[in-house]
Amino acid sequence: MLESEVEEYDSDGDLMYRPRVRYTYRVNGREYIGDAAYRMGYSTNSRREIERFVQERPAGKLVEVYYDAKQPERSFLVDNVRTAFLVGVLIFVVLSVYVILSVSMGFGSPG
């Protein structure tokens, strides 16, 4: 990890935070420099969350880097797409179970 710090910026009057990172990685003997923290861009109004991200990946630390095998210059540190997908699946399952139980127990039916 070459650089890892908290970046703050104004988004329509709201103070937002995101990690600003730079890291090196090698693919087939060639060195690349990456600057994407997340697979899909991510920012938050929680400075603490981004500070935690930065503290876990300080400059000088060896970090795991994900990259596109067909375009190795495309890289990121955290695959937040997978996390968002899993959260969506979990919500769907919970709501489905709730609906099935509600129907089978007769909630909402007259009389």
Image: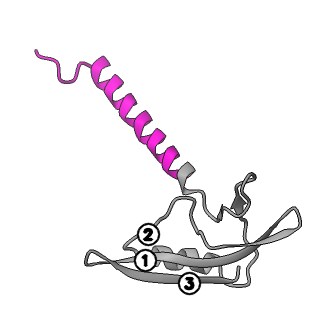
Which of marks 2 and 3 precedes in the sequence?
A: 3
103 or 57, which lies in front?
57
Left or right: residue 97 versus residue 34 is: left
Question: Which class describes the residues within 10 Å of circle 3: few (<14), some (14-19), or many (20+)?
Answer: some
Q: Do the residues labelled 2 and 1 touch (CB within 8 Å)?
A: yes
Image coordinates for residue 21, horizontal then vertical, percent: 60, 78
Q: Eyeballing the image, is 61 above or below 107?
A: below
Q: Say which residue appears at 89% left-offset and 67% top-offset.
A: 29
* Gap in angstroms between the C-alphas marked 1 and 3: 10 Å
Residue type at mark 3: give it.
Answer: Glu
Determine which of the numbered discs, if any, sits on residue 5 in the image: 3
Q: What residue type is labelled 1?
A: Tyr
The residue beneath circle 1 is 17
Residue 3 in the figure: left or right of residue 80: right
Q: Is residue 15 left or right of residue 25?
A: left
Percent position of residue 45, x then y: 36, 73
Q: Which amino acid does label 2 sit on?
A: Ser
Q: Do the residues labelled 3 and 2 touch (CB within 8 Å)?
A: no
Name the residue beneath numbered marker 2.
43
Q: Give the range drawn in magenta.
A: 83-111
